[in-house]
Amino acid sequence: MSTTTIYIKGMSCGGCVSSVKAVLAKIPGVNSVEVSLADKQAVIQHDIPLEDGALDQAIKDAGFEVVKQ
């Protein structure tokens, strides 16, 4: 199993957290998603390689910005 951490800009409430979690959970191969408003990040557990950019695109489509670290 692999873990991917993505830092997110633009989340301001629990609704934002729920939105990000929902879009990421729909991606094939994703097993679990934890989103932290305080840490401004999502930690995604997946068991197969994901399409390049799939996670970032889902976050952008939900109205948030991916922050490259």
Image: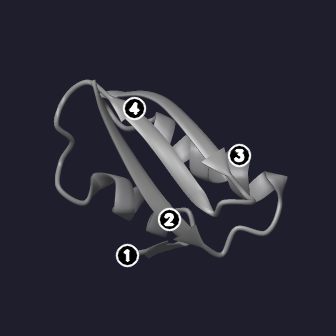
Which sits earlier in the primary sequence, circle 3 or circle 1?
Answer: 3
Please name the residue shown 25% across and 60% down the image: 53
Contact, CB < 8 Å: mark 2 with mark 1?
A: yes
Which residue position is annotated with label 3?
18
Side of 53 relative to 3 (left or right): left
Q: Position of residue 15 (x, y in %)?
A: 79, 53
Q: Is residue 49 above or below residue 67?
A: above
Which residue position is annotated with label 1?
68
Which structural element holds mark 4? strand
- Give the amino acid type for the residue marked by disc 3 in the picture: Ser
Cα distance in 3D space between marks 2 and 1: 7 Å
Please name the residue shown 50% across and 65% down the image: 7
Q: Which mark is residue 7?
A: 2
Q: Is residue 38 above or below residue 3?
A: below
- Give the amino acid type for the residue marked by disc 1 in the picture: Lys
Which structural element holds mark 3? helix
Which sits earlier in the primary sequence, circle 2 or circle 4?
Answer: 2
- Give the amino acid type for the residue marked by disc 2 in the picture: Tyr
Q: Is residue 68 above or below residue 25?
A: below
Cα distance in 3D space between marks 3 and 2: 15 Å
Disc 1 packing (10 Å; few <14; some 14–19; many ≥20): few
Which residue position is annotated with label 4?
45
Q: Nearer the viewer, mark 3 or mark 4?
A: 4
Q: How is the image coloured?
A: one colour
Please name the residue shown 53% across and 36% down the image: 33
Which sits earlier in the primary sequence, circle 3 or circle 4?
Answer: 3
